[in-house]
Amino acid sequence: MSNKKKIALVVGASRGIGKSIALKLASSGFDIWLTYQSNHKAAQETKKEVDGLGVSCQLFAFDVSDYKATEGSLGKICDETPPDVLVYNAGIARDNLMVWMTKDEWNKVIDTNLNGFYNIMHVVLFAMLREKRGRIIVISSTSGQIGQAGQVNYSASKAGLIGAAKALAREVGKKNILVNVVAPGVIETEMTQDLPKDKIMPLIPLARFGKAEDVSSIVNFLCTEENMYIHGQVIGVNGGLAI
């Protein structure tokens, strides 16, 4: 990409995969706009690490499922200075068998993982279209590709993101905006630390859980490679869990 300073908006980046993505893009020279919901300590620690890489990091704390809060936090700054890269990584899980799943468990996951994507795009997309440039990376999940028992709500939200991203890619490709999906499998983060490794590991041909860096390296490639003809695609980072 050109020598002009680039901005990457990473949604949901205070910890785990999002933090790794923010640090990787910062190491590639992007200034980072980092959003998070409420973990101020983790966000400040990530900001310190990003700043240490010689780029700037602005923090935005809000609930991505709240449309007004999203618009209030990002609307003005994105309209004035559209980000060059948008990574949508916001996501929560409320696992339960469908027969026992509460309405609240369903709604919270859909509101954050899927409706949050609408809220972010509604704030950012027009300005990106006006500039006729940009790259959008949506972080989905293997669960959105093949489904997972106990995760009907999560799988539905992540499958919805894949459909949304593919449709968006058809809409904005002619405006020089590339849209792709990265679908991680089982990645070693706080979100997966309580999973039964002994039962899951035999299902993974590479015989290991992924690391956050396995995901962030792919995102970085999609955001920085100049010779880019990948558009509207889903790239699985799952060690062969889904083939």
Image (cartoon, rainbow, N blue to C red):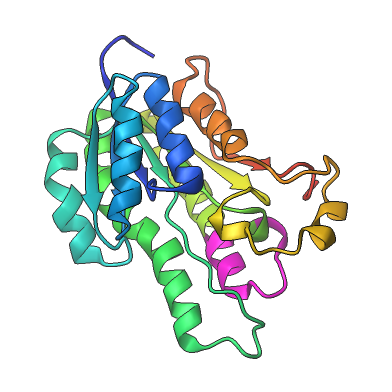
Residue 7 seen in the figure: no
Total count of labels: 0
Tell me the quarter of the picture where residue 51 sits.
top left
* Residue 53: x %, y % from top left: 34, 21
Q: Residue at x 69, y 63 (%)?
A: 195
Q: Residue at x 29, y 63 (%)?
A: 63
Q: Is residue 116 above or below residue 111?
A: above
Q: Nearer the viewer, residue 179 or 137?
A: 137
Question: Which stretch appears magenta?
Answer: 145-160
Q: Nearer the viewer, residue 206 or 43?
A: 43
Q: Nearer the viewer, residue 170 or 105?
A: 105
* Residue 201: x %, y % from top left: 82, 53
Q: Is residue 1 above or below residue 83?
A: above
* Residue 108: x %, y % from top left: 43, 75
Q: Is residue 199 above or below residue 185?
A: below
Q: Residue at x 29, y 19 (%)?
A: 54
* Residue 73: x %, y % from top left: 17, 53
Q: Nearer the viewer, residue 26 or 144?
A: 26
Q: Residue at x 27, y 33 (%)?
A: 83
Residue 189 in the magenta stretch? The answer is no
Q: Main secondary structure of the magenta part?
A: helix
Q: Is residue 100 above or below residue 189?
A: below
Residue 42 seen in the figure: yes
Q: Would residue 54 appear left or right of 114 to someone viewing this image? A: left
- Quarter that holds the N terminus: top left
